[in-house]
Amino acid sequence: MPSSTFDLEEKRLEREVRKRRAKLVLIQLPEGLKPHGPRLAAIVERAGALAIVSADPCYGACDLAIVEAERLGADLIVHYGHSAMLKQAAVSTLYIEAKAKSSVKNAVKKTVPYLEQWKKIGLVTTIQHVYKLNEAKNVLLEAGKAVAVGDAGRLKYAGQVLGCDYSNAKAVSKEVEAFLFVGGGKFHALGVALATAKPTIVADPYEKRAFSIEDETARMLKRRWATIHEAKQAEKIAILIGLKAGQKRLDQALKMKKLVEDAGKKATFLALKEITPEALMQFPTVDAFINTACPRLSIDDAKKFRKPLLTPKEMFVVLGELQWEELCKKGWFES
């Protein structure tokens, strides 16, 4: 990935390391930015601190490397690519959002034909493009659209979405007919569609193209219904508790255990940091799993798992506490 694609704020990095008088810095990067690790480490060391680059996967701001930093004796975490999510005082953390430098205007212009049948459009993006939302909004206004940008207050910026948090989209869902997602790929756009049950169009500024994810959404819904249907036969359920810093939802896991046992089924807790098919295969007597950690694992990686991997909301459908149609209407993610 070219260094010019994102603003990695090298001068700020050096300045903050000096200002904080850090002695050992752990640099945490998402997969696409890992190639820049050695260069960023050199900047940290130029500022007078020892630098260590985390080579582990980083799935988001929920995956802050607090335990790893403590084990290494780091007094500063530099976390790239996300905005702050966790309130923690264990290790000082510097968030560098890695803003995309490219314009979004041309990609958004290409979405206008796709949005032709709708007047009221919701506008969402990731942290990398949130600074370009006004640019995108102006293109839509010039095309005669009414534009809504949600600000639910849970995320740092209006219009921002995370892989597990679409509160800004849901905040304006009732007042719009469709959504425009500005960003790369289908991952977040599919999340918007599942969270709001509204048509979603993508403006991809990296590939400078526009497209609909209607077909992908339909296929995903079919797969989720099939998973729910299969899980209705399950008698032994394991409830997964995530051990990543921002994915530990013990209260929710306790509620799910009571729900399962009240339905006359057996429930077991499993705690793990990485939810993988290989880890779950070690429990062959379990018929289905409820994932209280990252909900995207159940949705995007379902085909990798041999047995049903359900979100808590899907388990309500399995047990008849929630109708499938209501799940589709309310969405897979917490409001």
Image: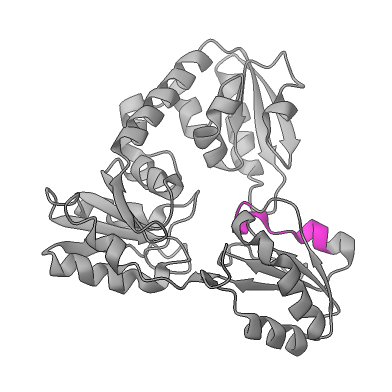
Q: Is residue 289 left or right of residue 204?
A: right
Q: Is residue 177 visible?
A: yes
Residue 87: give x, y in percent of width and height: 64, 65
Q: Quadrant of the N terminus?
A: bottom right
Of all residues, the one furthest to the front in this rendering is 2
Is residue 207 located in the magenta-colored stretch of the structure? Answer: no
Q: Nearer the viewer, residue 332 or 29?
A: 29
Q: Is residue 120 left or right of residue 154?
A: left
Residue depicted at x 40% and y 73% = 131
Residue depicted at x 54% and y 26% = 303
- Start-end of magenta stretch: 59-69
Chief SS of the magenta region:
helix
Residue depicted at x 40% and y 58% = 183
Residue 315: give x, y in percent of width and height: 50, 26
Q: Nearer the viewer, residue 101 or 194?
A: 101
Residue 216 position (above or below residue 145) = above
Residue 192: give x, y in percent of width and height: 37, 47
Q: Is residue 270 left or right of residue 144?
A: right
